[in-house]
Image (cartoon, rainbow, N blue to C red):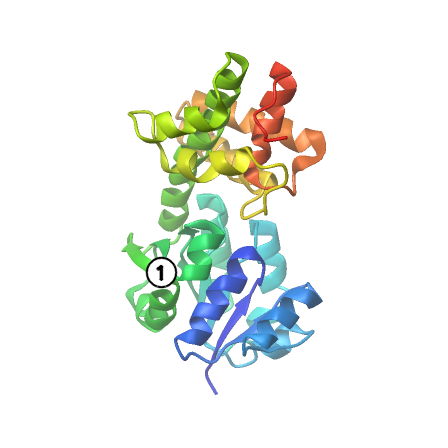
Amino acid sequence: MAGTAIIGLGAMGQGMARNILAAGIPLSGFDLSPDARGRFAKAGGRTGDDAADLVADCDLLLVMVATAAQAEAALFGGVTDALAPGAVVILSSTVAPSEARAIAARLNDAGHVMLDAPVSGGQVGAESGTLTIMASGPPAAFERADALLAAVSKKVHRLGDEPGMGATYKVVHQLAAGVHLVAAAELMAFGAKAGCDPQTLLDIVSSSAGQSWMMDDRVPRMMQVDPVATSTVDIFIKDLGLVVQSARDSGVPVPLAAAAYQMMVGAGGMGLGRHDDSAVIRAYEALTNCKVTES
């Protein structure tokens, strides 16, 4: 019997799964974390300790893991053999365009179809069902995935029939997200060192020409001692690394993205990889010997 499944029940996948269930779509789910599987089961999902068993005969599978390597490990260790013939696999992880194309080719060889569908909106968007989806793939795949995509998003951008274009748009988007995030940290560090009150500085910039979504969303967390992680430093090290890699493949200089990447790597080197990505401010605090964080 055809069905729907998800692999990856972390910060993003958990919220997406809950919205899929709330839309009345029966859902099986797997994650390596027993705790994540437990939270999913409490929400009404069917889970267990074997991914292949859970996806058996499903014709729609959403993959929401962190990296291309994790996606490959999740898919090609028995899962693709267990899916119904001709299943649609929605890859919503942020990966390089070349990686999306390679995974799609392997799925095609296994008799399945991939919808290259990375998302933007973070954990808040995943939990509220308001993600933006950048997707490319065959029309039939969009048709099969339509109800699921509607359950988790506010907007689905259809970007053509070929896998890799969804990933391309997402990687280009991450240049803006990463640069704006690091620029906000740099602005706050500069202001604090120059004698500005951080909250007053935020109030001024957020209502002036220098305003950005990242400024409004991340700076309040920069001023907290230990904010809840909704997106980690490690994730932005990965994503900005993909920006630099993909730009190199395209022959495009991205000096701002490269600089933002280095600041994220610096924060990761301070042991902050699993912390909220706003912790990039700690790297600036170390460089300036001046605190932005509330004491």
Q: Which residue does the image show at 47% across and 44% down from the upper left? A: 98
- Vertical arrangement, residue 160 with respect to residue 60, above or below: above
- Vertical arrangement, residue 174 with respect to residue 197, above or below: below
Please state, as top left, top right, bottom left or bottom right, where the C terminus lies in the image: top right
Within-10-Å neighbours for mark 1: few <14, some 14–19, many 20+: many
Direction from residue 247 to residue 150 in the image, left or right: left
Direction from residue 143 to residue 236 in the image, left or right: right
Q: Is residue 63 visible?
A: no
Q: Which sits in the foreground, 34 or 124? A: 124
- Vertical arrangement, residue 166 with respect to residue 129, above or below: above
Residue at the spot of label 1: 153
- Residue 139: x, y in percent? 28, 65
Q: Which residue does the image show at 57% across and 30% down from the upper left? A: 280
- Residue 102: x, y in percent? 49, 52
- Residue 144: x, y in percent? 35, 73
Instruction: Pick out the residue farthest to the top.
Output: 194
**What amino acid is labelled 1 in the image?**
Ser
Q: Is residue 177 visible?
A: yes
Direction from residue 141 to residue 219 in the image, left or right: right
- Residue 13: x, y in percent? 52, 61
